Amino acid sequence: MCGIFGIAYRTEAPLALGPVLRRALERLEYRGYDSVGVAVMTSANSESVQVYKDVGKVSEVVGKYSIDSLRGVAGVAHTRWATHGRPSKENAHPHVDCTGAVAVVHNGIIQNYAELRERLAAAGHTFRSETDTEVIPHLIEEYMKALPPWEAFREAIGQLRGAFAIVALIASEPHTLYFARRLSPLVVGVAEESAVVASDLPTVLDHTRRVIVLHDDEYGYTAPGEVHVERGGAPVDLASRVVEISWTADMASKEGYPHYMLKEIHEQPMALAGTLSGLDWDTLRAAAEALHNARHVYIVAAGTSLHAGHVMALGLARLGVKATPIVASEVHSVVGAVGEGDLGVAISQSGETIDTLVAVRALRGAGARVMAITNVVGSSVARESDIVIYTRAGPEVAVAATKTFTTQVLVVNALLHALAEAVGNGDIAHVGDNMQRVPHMVSRVLQLTEGPIRELSRAVAGRASAYYLGRGLGLPVAMEGALKLKEVAYIHAEAYPAGESKHGPIALVADGFPVIFVFLDREVEKALMGNVMEMRARDATTIGLIPPGASHLAELFDSYVEVPYLDPYNNVILYVVPLQLLAYYAAVHRGYDPDKPRNLAKTVTVE
Ligand code: AGP
């Protein structure tokens, strides 16, 4: 959702703060691009902050208000993904109190804002926006009538219900940032000359590699060389909480690619190799045992991660484990059946998706143990799970998940391999051997398919709708391909089990309607060929992803792209790559920015 950042320097003399804030805004833009804003303490003696904010992209707002030229000793910055209140200048963050001495940036939702607002308005506070956030600076202001800033901040936080990551700047303490976290991520940097807090690790890494990842319900303050954190009124011992991060901030830059999405698609061989070499087989074997012993496995995830969950469910079924993939936000409909002996599996790139986190809590509350597959070390889902397996895809900046999906599937395949070994099922034993070849094979896929897909994407870009059809493991790939096309190219795309297409969806097919088929499993080839013929008979434009040298398949299609073949499970990784490229190039042909899909946020932290 929203991106937040704050920095306060030790110096008394104003510094060139503008470029620092701009850089932070650029990094955080993927978290929300409804509006942008900063608040600055122009000198250590100022009695109020200066606020610059507006709707628009970072580059537009930065240019309009000459953010680059700002000087000061401290500042906060925000990119907004609207929840309460439409995108507008008034609703943009930072929000300030009546005096302009308290500036707050916030990510999340304050559930009890209406009653707080009423109470504060009755006490004489003037509100200028429709947001839930604006109650926070006014609450702090109210408590500051009787208390020093830190105590006033602490009292104010105690009044808030809901989900939040907050950074506050208070003019009377120009070298200090106040912060709080509940459900929404927040990271504090540890440095001598500056104090830094941000919703995202890469933004902190621009300033220091020593960080503290805050846990739920922690709040505190930081000044250069000092971090103080409390939870439930008691100080938190931070001795073991400071971690040295090896990711450089530059790992999150575009490195010459026009968009992060394309960069991250091309990073997949590296991300997969990193995930492969980081696999902890002891943990995987323990996880496989937990799967084997589970009465029932409930796989909860959202969006792309859920597609990896479908791959897992199909593999588990093959190995005799009862598993149900569930949209995380629908967990309530199954939780009545969950109990001790069941196992939840939460798959989440960010580990912060609120629907998935809530599902983890519901499953654990019902007595199940939970295993997490996530990309972010120390994320909420990781911390709240019994077993954690990390994908090591590195930071993913593009809103559309690409390398995090393929690394999730690699981890799923490794788990299936460990389970197949444990139960002595030779059926999918070769998955483990082939896995080692996946990074190299993905490089081949990129080399072989990017040109033809780029060409093909022109035709798809001109259409209003498309179908993606597959059978078995081809279906999650079809689902992921369709999601990508919707997300970045804004083309209506649906995925169906190919056999199901006859039961309704085929009614739309006529006159060049594009239908994309995923042929990644020889076991279901014959039936799928029949489905291609049905679509051809209705004048669809048929496009096939097929194994190399399969002339009997090639002749079925108007266009086809050959994709190297390993085995159906590893093929999920190989065959999704051309579909990621198809969505990317269709978006570019249509003139859209694939890194900033409208209405979407990288991490959805509201239910
Ligand atoms: C993927 O392209 C989407 N941006 C979205 O569906 C995403 O996969 C979903 O929100 C889940 O995110 P998570 O993996 O961080 O939990």
Image (tube, grey):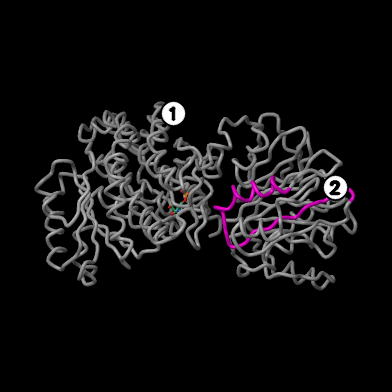
* Position of residue 370 measured from the top left corner of the image (x, y, whole percent): 46, 42
Helix or strand or loop: what does disc 2 sit on? loop
Comparing 186 with 123, the one in front is 186
Q: Amino acid at mark 2?
A: Glu
- Asked if residue 279 is positioned above or below residue 84 in the image, the reply reads above
- The residue wearing badge 1 is 278
> What element does badge 1 sit on?
helix
Was residue 496 drawn as part of the magenta stretch in this picture? no
Q: Residues within 10 Å of mark 1 (few under 14, many from 20)?
A: few
The quarter of the picture where the N terminus appears is bottom right
- Specify which label sits upstream in the sequence, 2 or 1: 2
Residue lying at 79% horizontally and 41% vertically, measured from the top left: 9
Residue 73 drawn at (x, y percent): 81, 45
Distance from Cα at disc 2 to Cα at disc 1: 44 Å
Specify whether residue 38 is painted magenta. yes
Is 368 left or right of 193, judged from the image as shown? left
Task: Name the residue: 31% across, 28% down.
Answer: 436
Nearer to us: label 2 or label 1? 2
The answer to whether 341 appears left or right of 131 in the picture is left
Q: Position of residue 478 (x, y in %)?
A: 29, 54
- Is 294 left, or right, of 496 in this rendering? right
Q: Is residue 493 above or below residue 193?
A: below
Relative to 360, 476 lies left or right: left
Q: Give the residue number, with chain letter if any, for mark 2.
A: 173
Q: Residue at x 47, y 36 (%)?
A: 388
42 and 105: which one is in front? 42
Q: Position of residue 375 (x, y in %)?
A: 48, 40
Q: Which residues are magenta?
A: 18-45
Residue sitting farthest toward the left: 552
